[in-house]
Image (cartoon, coloured by chain):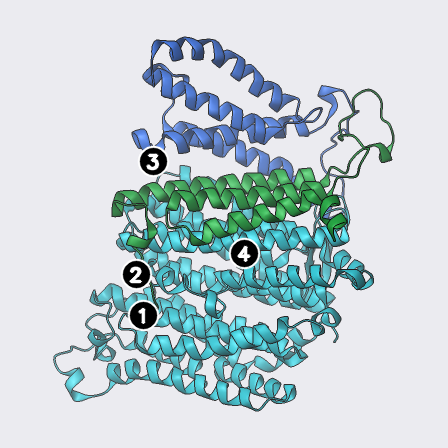
Amino acid sequence: MTTPIIRRIVEWLLPCLWIFSFYIMLFGHLSPGGGFSGGSVLGACLILDRHVNGANAFGARFTGERLLKLALAALLLYGFLKGQSFLAGVLHMNGLPVPLGTPGNILSSGLILPLNVLVGIVVAVAFYLIATLFEEGHL
Amino acid sequence: MQGLHLTSLLSILILMITAFIMPVIKQRQLVTKVSLATMGVVLVMLALVAVDVAKVEHYTATIGHYDAPFGITFDIGPIEAVVGVLFAFVSTMVVWYASFGIHKEIKENRVKLFYTLIHLLLASLLGIVFTSDLFNSFVFIEVSTLAACGLIAIKDKPENIKATMKYLILSSLGSGLVLMGIAYLYSMTGHLNMRAIHETLQVSVVGNERAILVSLTMFTIGLGIKAAMFPLHVWLPDAHASAPGPSSAILSGIVIKAPVVLLFKVLFMVYGHEILKDTVILNLILIFGATGMIMGSLFARVQTDLKRMVAYSSVAQMGYIFFGFGLGNALGMTIAIYHILAHGLTKSCLFLSVSSFIEQTGQREIDKMRGIGREMPITLAIFSLGGLSMVGIPMLPGFVSKWNLALAAIDYGQIFLLLIILASSLLNVSYYFPIIINGYFGNANLEGKIYKSKMKPVRELVPLILLSIMMVIVGFGSGPILDWIASAMPSL
Amino acid sequence: MISFLVSHYFQIGTVILFGVGFMTLLLNNNLIRKIIGLNIMDTSIFLFFITIGYSGGREAPIINGGFKGIDAYVTPIPTGLMLTGIVVAVSTTAFALALTILFYERFGTIDLSEVIDSGGD
């Protein structure tokens, strides 16, 4: 799995994958994509890195505990942001003053952009943990 | 009281938030306390929901700022309120019981995962019952399947892995069928909200009869696999018998009941009676329910393992509920929902007391349980109370179910069905009473046993005692409960 | 009948795929093939949902140079629902695969017929 050809090609491929995953996550409200697909590409990129580079990979410097805490924090923040909107809807009040946004403008979409990023983080960490769980035994 | 309308959604949110906080807390005692506190708060909230529904009679809570049919709503009436209180009460008692002894059954580093899974499971079950949007209920069904599989596989023996694999495969089949049924309904009507589909289906029945029949069959078989309808019950004995004690109580008490409530809503509130009368679905459910009542008890008689016997008895009792659906008249539907209450409380009592027996004596076979009445008197008393309710002794909830089912069968017109109910009661006697009689009486059984030698301390038995007191209250106060449930039935 | 089959070929292909996936999940003995069957079945349902929402002549619901009014776009609701469905299917597949690894460690085989004792007891 670690012949020189593969190592060379992956060295050139990984930066493109990173940037592409961030593009999908950030532009989720303007073009196809969004949190889940961006997170999947990021997770696949981290797994590829781990398989080819072994201990020098980007993901190897985080332990399983810290990644789990990062994912849980992102999930809780998502829950609070969305939860106040749902609860305000039940009471027929308006929640946080969040703008509705104009089509075509990346920064004006209100809460969609941070929510996409949070979902992407959670999905990427989940994929990475599941794939590397049986190699090292994090949990 | 707009604020009280919030508590249904808030309870699900609180359960999920605490479920995600718990894996990062370090000490085990703090996790137990957090879990117990959350369960208590959720129980109080759902009791408030029930009080609110008793005053207002039915309300709709819109999630987000979009009304039905464009948004998701929670439609809460008497049925959902009563079933919600049942789920919260059984979960609270089981978590209380588990906080004393779960670390003896599963590994130390998995106890936090156990509490997380129970919170997720309760949140998704409440979501299935409350929601009024079909795709939302599918998502909650999948979450509950994964959480229930986790609760079985958390004990690391080989038979647990085998049982979880069976449960996961059959449950995925069921979910696939339910999703295809939802797709058919969406293609026929273009809506996903239950009331909107009902109104649109009334006008567009004419060209679509085959599509309606196929989608109805898919819903019945798919939800029947998850609720252990008779020929589709094959995953239940392995799964419920090999799981750890508190898990079996939750699995048998409430996890197989939520798909039944969803099936009730789909059959009688989305499709409605006029469409159902033209198809054979109700007769099919009646036949499956009646066969299940007899065959479940017959299988339970030949078991030697105590938990497997109680699991097969679950199959028989779910047959009662499907029998009530199949009869199709108002009394049948009401008594099916009442039996969800009765069986949920009774079966959790039984499974928790059986788990006490197994934990204290170390044996699992029925023959080794002779004379246990002298060693563990209170636990066997609670087991006997549950067994008497299953058989149908008056003043306990099982009797109310059987009596009203017999009345509904007479209303339906076929006297043959009365014989089936009677036969199933007698079969229930034949496998519950030997345990009780051999436990308390008989000189050959009782010699060598010391009084109260293996009893658990009373403070660990308090959740069991509270469950049995609630079961007796549901039996005594069955009149008002039945009237309240009957007020929510759709008109025929 | 033939004109119906020809004009609705998308939906018929989808339902045939559903049948193939269902039978693979139910009847095959190998665990990995069961998981593949589960994925085929779920994917076919997603395809069915999306073909319901299509109406000819309209374009995808992405604003690409001025908003053209409501009737120029395909309805975006089925696509949004199916994203949720794909997430659910991926989670179930991940759990099933992890369980298969545990199964292999305990029993030494991934053939279900060698392990399950069939017939009611």
Q: Which chain is indicated by disc 2? A: C
Residue B465 x/y as whole percent: 39, 72
* Cα–Cα gap, marks 1 and 3: 38 Å
Q: CA distance from mark 2 to mark 3?
A: 33 Å
Report crowding for label 4: few under 14, some 14 to 19, many 20 or more residues within 10 A (C-alpha): many
Identify residue for label 3: A139
Colour green maps to chain: C
Can residue B148 be seen here? The reply is no
Quote the CA–CA distance across marks 2 and 1: 9 Å
- Depth check: give the residue in front, A12 or B139: A12
Chain designation of label 1: C
Residue lying at 35% horizontally and 14% vertically, measured from the top left = A56
Relative to B229, is C11 above or below?
above
Closest to the observer: B228 or C37?
A: C37
Q: Nearer the viewer, mark 2 or mark 3?
A: 2
Pair 1/3: label in front:
1
Is A113 located above or below residue C29 in the figure? above
Question: Circle 4 sits on which residue?
Answer: B125
C-beta proximity under 8 Å, tags 2 and 1: yes
Q: Colour of chain B?
A: cyan
User: Which colour represents chain A?
Assistant: blue
Q: Mark 1 highlights which residue?
A: C121
